[in-house]
Amino acid sequence: MKLTFSPASPFARKVRIAAIELGLIDKIELTPATVAPGTANEDYSRITPLKKLPVLITNDGDVILDSYVIVEYLNEIAGGSLIPDYGPRRWKAKTNHSLINGMLDSMLLCRYEKMVRPQGLQWQAWSDDHWNRAWTGMARFENMPEVLNGPFDISQIGLVCVLGYADFRFADCGWRKAYPKLDAFHQKMLERPSVKISVPPAA
């Protein structure tokens, strides 16, 4: 299997953590890819018109899009337990992950607005709104002990990627001071090899 990725991508990090936890990382070839707003990448667009990371290409040549779908696929073939099979826990995990993915999307848009959009064209109110979505999402997870203290699953993996991306791209945002329970959770998660190995490089 091949996984397109960038060390900076929190979405690709999510899949890498899952692959390590499921014992599949040695069966996956990590293929670096560069995607950026306003920059053409025709080769990658032929793989996925959405031009997003990551993409998993299976041994049969099938293309699997979206980090959650990729984790679900890997979890299934490995017989893992990162995503509950059925019942209320499954829908709660999927809902938590949808919130997490939305938070990551908003953080990425804030990054693009600040660093990529030309000066004079930046829309501060729009950026503030997206940052508030991520920030209030953190507040919600701060008060969810069932996630912070629960079994290691897709919700915890996604939350690790949110907090790691906050450190990576928004180092001065102050999330640790605002959310001490998330800080304690993150420190505990960094003891897991899969989480520690996949920390993004220094910005």
Image (cartoon, helix red, strand yellow):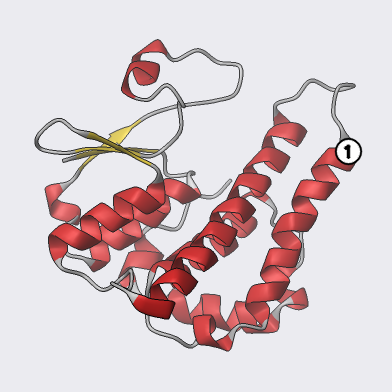
Q: Residue, x 59% and y 60% (percent of image)?
A: 99
Q: Residue, x 34% and y 14% (percent of image)?
A: 43
Look at the image and tell me in which quarter the N terminus lies.
top left
- The amino acid at mark 1 is Gln
Q: Nearer the viewer, residue 155 or 26?
A: 155
Q: Position of residue 173 (x, y in %)?
A: 76, 60
Residue carrying label 1: 124
Q: Residue furthest left?
A: 60
Look at the image and tell me in which quarter the C terminus lies.
top right
**How many marks can you see?**
1
Is 199 left, or right, of 107 in this rendering?
Answer: left
Please tell me whether residue 194 is drawn above or below residue 146 in the rendered image: above
Label 1 packing within 10 angstroms: few (<14), some (14-19), many (20+): few
Please tell me whether residue 120 is drawn above or below residue 140 in the rendered image: above
Q: Nearer the viewer, residue 148 or 163?
A: 148
Q: Residue, x 37% and y 25% (percent of image)?
A: 48
Q: Position of residue 22 (x, y in %)?
A: 21, 65
Residue 90 in view (yes/no)? yes
Residue 191 in view (yes/no)? no
Is 154 left, or right, of 57 in this rendering?
Answer: right
Image quadrant where residue 136 sits: bottom right
Is 29 left, or right, of 199 in this rendering?
Answer: left
State the SS at label 1: helix
Image quadrant where residue 94 sits: bottom left
Q: Residue, x 70% and y 53% (percent of image)?
A: 170
Q: Residue furthest front?
A: 87
Q: Position of residue 134 (x, y in %)?
A: 70, 58
Q: Position of residue 145 (x, y in %)?
A: 57, 88
Is 182 left, or right, of 80 in this rendering?
Answer: right
